Amino acid sequence: MEASDILIGVVGKTNVGKSTFFSAATELGVAIENRPFTTIDPNIGIGYVRKKCVHVKLGLSRCDASNSVCLEGDRMIPVKMMDVAGLVPGAHRGRGLGNKFLDDLRKADVLLLVVDASGSTDPEGNPVKPGTYDPVDEVRQMLQEIDEWMYGIISKDWERFARHVDTGGVVDVPGAIAERMSGLGIRKAHVIKALEASGLADKPLSTWSSDDLRRFTHELRKAAKPIVIVANKVDLPGAEEGVKRLREELGEYPVVPASAAAEAALRRAARAGVIRYKPGDPDFEVVDESKLNRKAKALLEAIRERVLSKWGSTGVQQAINKAVLEVLGMIAVYPVEDPNKYTDKQGRVLPDVLLVPRGTTARELAYRIHTDLGKTFLYAINAVTKQRVGESYVLHDDDVIKIVAAAARR
């Protein structure tokens, strides 16, 4: 099973449940302890975007999911996730694990910023009484560290670069900036957006002040590394007020209430056959009570009461969906070989699903499937409407598409 090209970075200060979130989302075993710096090296795992499978919409009895998983009509589409070492104040200057943490984020497309909504960890990641530390301050501190890290990279040798652009006849300034910063996963569209947002689009680079460069860096981080705030530990006292403050004070960022510990417990119970539960469900069903001792039963009831009934879910699946489908604006497209039977060459029904950016065209999809298909593209067929569409056809969510290329007719 291949994951999408999307990379989600799971970030945050130490000891806020970040590794628990990652483990719950990927079911990959990592060291989880109640102490700072549990995660030393980046962990890469596979998380899943959950969407209703198109076979349900088409009225088909089943699908033959190959590059993903179909769970009772819900398509679980794999995406890459990275959990890296936790931040402490001053990380961009090398404190704690410093830039080792930050450099691991270079290729991330979107960040899930896990924070302690209950306020029960101090800035250094040490446990304190719930409500002691403000989660809004925690977010601002983390954002400052990421901004300062990016500024340190961008400002290095900036004056020489700026003079070259201004005096060397460079016409495509955003393109030149993007090329210089390609190691951060920054594209030209990100640079254009940041230049406009910072009010620097028409100002020669060599005349930028340090404040201008910081303002540009801040906007570039927002464009290239968008953030979803995961308000973790909602099962603890004080978390409700923490979630409220995060939403009121940091309204520009999506805030998803979560309990990573609850999700991890539910997935363990589901794997053991004790309960029936799909990631993101608002409740679970006990299927084998004989496997539950008194302690386990009490834990499940506490999760139902403190998390599921109160918040509607554990938030782990919702955070991933929010990051990929809403913040990144990805849609699901199903390529097929036979548009009438919705099958591939082996006769498998809707085996593959691809996550592509909203606005992707039919020809761009062809290139995504195989370079030769893109080069020899003739037209595509919308398998649902049976209509022939051209190269500029803009794909819609849950489109089922047959690509017809010149090579296919020989």
Image (spheres, rainbow, N blue to C red):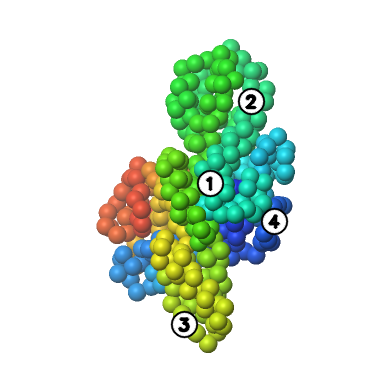
Q: Amino acid at mark 3?
A: Val
Q: Which is nearer the N-term, disc 3 or disc 1?
A: 1
Real-space CA distance between mark 1 and mark 4, rounded to the nearest whole angstrom:
19 Å
Real-space CA distance between mark 3 and mark 2, rounded to the nearest whole angstrom:
58 Å
Is residue 63 depicted above or below 218 in this figure?
below
Q: Which is nearer the N-term, disc 3 or disc 2?
A: 2
Q: Which mark is residue 155?
A: 2
Labelled pair 4, 2 in contact (Cβ < 8 Å): no
Could you say which quadrant of the image residue 284 lies in?
bottom left
Q: Amino acid at mark 4?
A: Arg
Real-space CA distance between mark 3 and mark 1, rounded to the nearest whole angstrom:
38 Å
Q: Residue at x 67, y 51 (%)?
A: 126
Q: How would you rate the neighbour count of disc 4 (Cα within 10 Å): few for under 14, some for 14-19, many for 20 or more?
A: few
Q: Residue at x 35, y 49 (%)?
A: 395
Q: Amino acid at mark 1?
A: Pro
Q: Residue 222 at x, y = what percent?
A: 50, 36
